Image: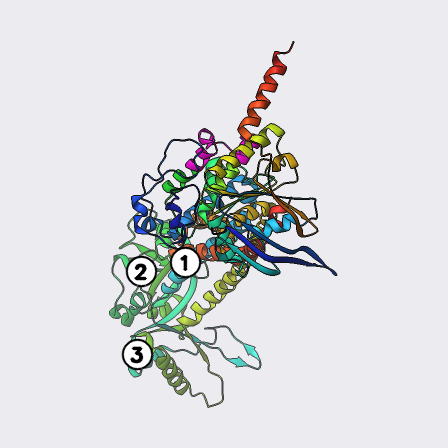
Amino acid sequence: MKSVIQLQDIHKVYHTGEVDVHAVRGVSLEIGPGEFVAIMGASGSGKSTLMNLIGCLDRPTQGRYLLDDTDVSELDRDELADIRNQKIGFVFQGFNLLPRTSALENAELPMLYMHDHLTSRDQRQRALEALETVGLGERSGHHPNQLSGGQQQRVAIARALVNHPALLLADEPTGNLDSQTSIEIMGVFQKLNEQGMTVVMVTHELDIARYTKRNVIMRDGKVVSDTPVADRLKADAELRRLREAQHAVQLAP
Amino acid sequence: MRNCAGYARPSTRSNWRHENRSECIAPVLGRRNVRNWCSLETRHSPFPVGAGCARGRARFSMRIVAILKVAFRALQRNKMRTVLTMLGIIIGVAAVIAMVGIGNGAKAQVEAQIASLGQNVILIFSGSMTRSGIHSGWGSAGTLMVEDADAIRREIPGVQGVSPELRSVAQAAAGNQNWSTQILGESPDYFQLRQWPLADGTSFTEQDVRGANKVAVIGKTTAQQLYGNENPLGQIVRIKNVPFTVVGLLSSKGLSVMGSDQDDVIIMPYTSAMKRVLGVTTLRSINVQAAAPQLLPVIQQQLIGLLRQRHRILPGRDDDFTVRGQQDIADMATAQSKTMTLLLGSIAAISLLVGGIGIMNIMLVSVTERTREIGIRMAVGARGHDILLQFLIEAVTLSAIGGVLGIGLGIGASNLVASKMQWPTLTPMWASAAAFLVSATVGIFFGFYPARKAARLDPIEALRYE
């Protein structure tokens, strides 16, 4: 089976001031289609740097990176931008929606930078479908400040999906959300993954990582553990349990 | 082509989006009923399948429209700031437009006045003698004779009209009215030479000149002062107690270049002026009209030669007369307006420069404020030049709208001045077009640096920016 992500001995060195920071020291990683991976690690472990490399926001100092069978380690800025536009959907911790811009227009944003431009009707339709996919079809006209955190993150996911990427990349997607909303968002990822979407996320929360299928743990710029998740949580079941518990609390005298 | 593959949706879960993306296969169109991609719902909602490669072809204009929309929204968000930023451009452009409008009005006015002097006219003034270092005024030396004028008419080819001229101010009286006015002694050629047609009656004739007849043609102002609304033709006007018959009424000529009323005048045969009114034997000046403008330099040289010969002036000695072309007078007037234009032009240029710097400043602020937005746009695939274009278009929108408002303001101002000064209002189309182009160029020039700064941001740092 072909890999979506193939990292071969990736190094990243930052030349900041007098000392060189060796953030990633030789990571080799292969992620196949349909996988759901959580990259974990303490701060300074290099997971964010690795995330930026996987997301084509940055280039490795050394090593080869094949994304969807394309070698992206040697591409220039513009080519990387195209790769991000076509093959990667980003979800951030802070949602990163454009303020004072409707959910629909936020979801349309990646299509503005496509090479083969769609008509505005097609753009609208695709954005609406993506919003429906994350369960926000009725709120397409709302601005971010009229939406809850969970809803904002759903808009961000819709935006990530709108160009049909090969890879959904999430950087601490639940970091700004309460636990129930976090589970809801993980549920969205799980459903997307069930339908074949490859999802890679960075998180430092162990219980969130249990919703994924595979956990990669980093320390000091290296992968120290790479294990499938044994006791995988199902967001649907967890949510049901949570609601029952709340219900029980409300019924209690 | 790349994203065309986006429509070739996977038919199974396992190969989610892993077809060869660089291919756009024709059967794509046939996949209408392929299961919808990653729909959380179980229902099948087909994608806009018609949107294949052909429809997806890059439409640059649409992209510009989308970017313009973003630019307008950004400018609307800070209305006050937008207006204040535009103000520099507005003032600069308004200054340019007003300058051109007012300058053109003034120039047209001056040109009309100069044209009223007549076409292809050379003026010869008597006596520019310098004796013992003292320059006597024009005409005072009395060196020009009627015979000089006759000789010019006779001997110089290409001369169309000659009018010996005398000039004096005298009291004119008619009935119980009297009025101090300019008395001109001229030949009948004068009216043709000055392009000054009669409004009524006839001119005096060569006959009148030979007989030094007591006939006169009067200007509108003088007629008004002496006769009110009565018809002046056939009336008697007494000049220094010599009765003259009014035979003609001049059409109105308005103010001269120097601002005096040209219609306040009585014109009579020069012989009559010499013998009956002024009692002099020499002329003040001679008006000479050339048949064509290209003859002017030759005639001017010949005039000087002829008069020097007639006046027996030895080589190396000064002329006892002054020859002055109409062009000299026009040059004087345009030199003044050139200085004015230069002054106003530099004010406008400085104002546009300051306005441009204002735009640059506000665009730099805007880039800093929207660093995160730039990061988001880059993360979802905006290339450097997409960001560059967005900020450049924003700057140009700012300056172009300022330019349009400035053009409006400038035209308004020049119309106001024109109506106060009773000038023709002339704001040529090219001035508005040029002002608009210049303001747009200012936007490009001063918007480029901030836009490039935005385009060169590192997406990771831009995303992290608080």
Mark 3 vs mark 2, foreground winner is: 3
Q: In which quarter of the image is the C terminus of chain A?
A: top right
Question: Which is nearer the N-term, disc 3 or disc 2?
Answer: 3
Q: Nearer the viewer, residue B308 or B420?
A: B420
Q: Circle 2 is placed at which residue position?
A: B217
Q: Is residue A220 above or below residue B74?
A: below
Question: Can see residue A145?
Answer: no
- Chain holding disc 2: B
Residue type at the position of mark 3: Arg
Q: Nearer the viewer, residue B236 or A71?
A: A71
In what element is the residue under mark 3?
helix
The residue under the point 31% across, 69% down is: B187
* Image location (x, y in percent) of residue B46: 35, 37
User: Left or right: A36 with respect to B101?
Assistant: right
Range shown magenta:
A128-154
CA gap, disc 3 and disc 2: 24 Å
Q: Circle 1 is placed at which residue position?
A: B109
- Extreme residue toward the top, this view: A253
CA gap, disc 2 and disc 1: 26 Å
Q: Which of B79 and B102 is in front in this view?
A: B79
Q: Which quarter of the picture shows residue A6?
A: bottom right
Q: Is residue A3 above or below residue B162?
A: above
Q: Which numbered circle lies on residue B153?
A: 3
The residue under the point 57% across, 80% down is: B133
Q: Which numbered circle lies on residue A206?
A: none
Q: Which of A100 and B291 is in front in this view?
A: A100
Mark 2 vs mark 1, foreground winner is: 1
Question: Can see residue B440?
Answer: yes
